[in-house]
Image (cartoon, helix red, strand yellow):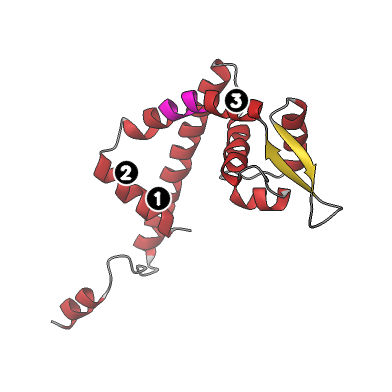
Amino acid sequence: MAEEKQAAATPPHAPVGRGEASAEADVAAWIALARANRRAMRLIEGRLKQAGLPQLAWYDVLWELERAGADGLRPFALERRLLFEQYNLSRLADRMAKAGLVERRACAEDGRGHMLAITEQGREMRERMWAVYRPAIAAVIGSSLSLAEKAVLAGLLDRTG
């Protein structure tokens, strides 16, 4: 009876014990997540490459700059928003500026700093990339999970951090 009361009082998302079974489940979940991510990235990057488009990291930068609006973002603010780690954001921004997709502007608040903003050519590239990226996401997630399962998965992954 006491166990039933304890179970009822414990929210379904409360952390589980740290026993051996829990540790094994942690590792199994981690392996499945890492493998799923690797498969997804290979498929998406492969489709972008096949279409003659830049790497997914470029899309990530273009999307965040487009969302930021005409003023753009400081590089450190952009880096915090990105989905993918960008250890060399400065070099990536240089390549994207050279391609005409982003532009560097002086920062009004800090004369030493600069802003990055998307260009019209950058918006067009992001749209071309999305036309390939979106169906690739659907191929990875859409074909194997129901709508309810997708919502559950998103909720579970959001809770991990």
Can you give x and y, in whole percent of width and height, for residue 147 in the image? 26, 41
Tell me the distance, in whole angstroms, between the alpha carbons under discs 3 and 2.
28 Å
**Quarter of the image holding residue 15?**
bottom left
Residue beneath disc 3: 125
Label disc, if present, on residue 29 of the rendered structure: 1
Q: Is residue 42 left or right of residue 8?
A: right
How far separated are the C-alphas under marks 2 and 1?
16 Å
> What is the x, y in percent for residue 71?
68, 46
Above or below 102: residue 19: below
- CB of mark 1 within 8 Å of CB of mark 3? no
Q: Residues within 10 Å of mark 3 (few under 14, many from 20)?
A: some
Label 3 secondary element: helix
Boundaries of the magenta span: 130-136
Question: Magenta stretch: dominant SS?
Answer: helix
Which sits earlier in the primary sequence, circle 3 or circle 2? 3
Q: Which residue is mark 2?
A: 150
Q: Amino acid at mark 2?
A: Lys
* Residue 142 position within the rendered picture, expressed as x and y whole percent measured from the top left: 33, 33
Quadrant including the N terminus:
bottom left
Q: Is residue 104 above or below residue 15?
A: above
Mark 2 or 1: the one toward you = 2
Residue at point 60% right, 21% down? 53
Question: Residue at image x 43%, y 27%?
Answer: 136
Most distant residue in the bottom direction: 2
- Which residue is depicted at the point 73% across and 25% down? 99
- Magenta run includes residue 146: no
Residue 88 visible in rendering: no
SS assignment at label 2: helix
